[in-house]
Image: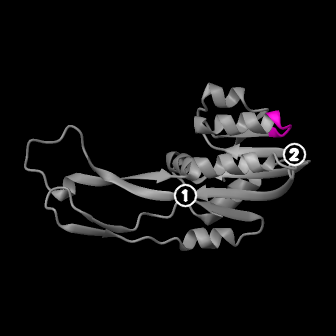
Amino acid sequence: MKTVVLIDGGHLRACTKVAGKKYDNALIVAFAALCTVAPEYLLRVFYYDSPQFEGTIPLPVSGGKTEFKSNDHWLRELAQNERFAVRRGTIGFRGWVPKKIPISGKALTDADFKPSFEQKGVDMRIGLDIASFCDGHPVERVVLVSADTDMIPAMKHARKAGLEVVIIRIGATKLHDNLLAHADLVRAVALP
């Protein structure tokens, strides 16, 4: 049974952080290998993530400038693994948020804030790839690693087209009931 594994990097990273494990390419590759079972034939792993934010922005209190530098070398290395494809979203700066709430009564400094970033475009790329698998049926099963309910329309589309949809539950991660309702199978996978 030809199978693809689609991994939402943000979701896998969050689960890894909760588990207290190091998030790196070795973990991603090892985890992906655990997502398929016999008689599935792994055609490809699609990994979706965004490189770090790069740019210069003003600090929240002093107004001075801070520069964020990006290194996407790890994404390029990941794409070199056998049967791996990396799909890149973008990341945007969304402002500064307090490190502690409530904010103390003392005079605030730049050190009291941390940057807030938002990943964009990953969900759309996952959904488009799922929809593309419905054309010509190059695969029979889609294994999805995500906890995002934005995936539901793509999951429904795949099932209507005759593909089987497997959702991965990582450890004790709670998946929304609607995700479970639109999957053919739920597979528990522990982090390596």
Residue 156: which quarter of the image? top right
Read off the residue under disc 1: 89
Q: Residue at x 83, y 58 (%)?
A: 43
- At a point 40% along the width and 68% down the height, the residue shown is 54
In this picture, residue 28 sits left or right of residue 158: left
The residue that label 2 is drawn on is 140
Q: Please tell me whether mark 1 sits on a helix, a strand or a loop.
A: loop
Asked which quadrant contains residue 68, the reply is bottom left
Image coords of residue 24 (percent x, y): 57, 63
Identify whether 127 is placed above or below 75.
above
The image shows residue 109 at horizontal and vertical percentages of 14, 56
| Identity, as a three-letter code, of the amino acid under mark 2 | Glu
**Nearer-N-terminus badge (2/1):** 1
Mark 2 element type: loop
Residue at point 13%, 61% (across, down): 62
Residue positioned 50% across, 64% down in the render = 51
Q: Which mark is residue 107?
A: none
From which residue to which does the magenta span run?
Answer: 160-164
Predominant secondary structure, magenta span? loop
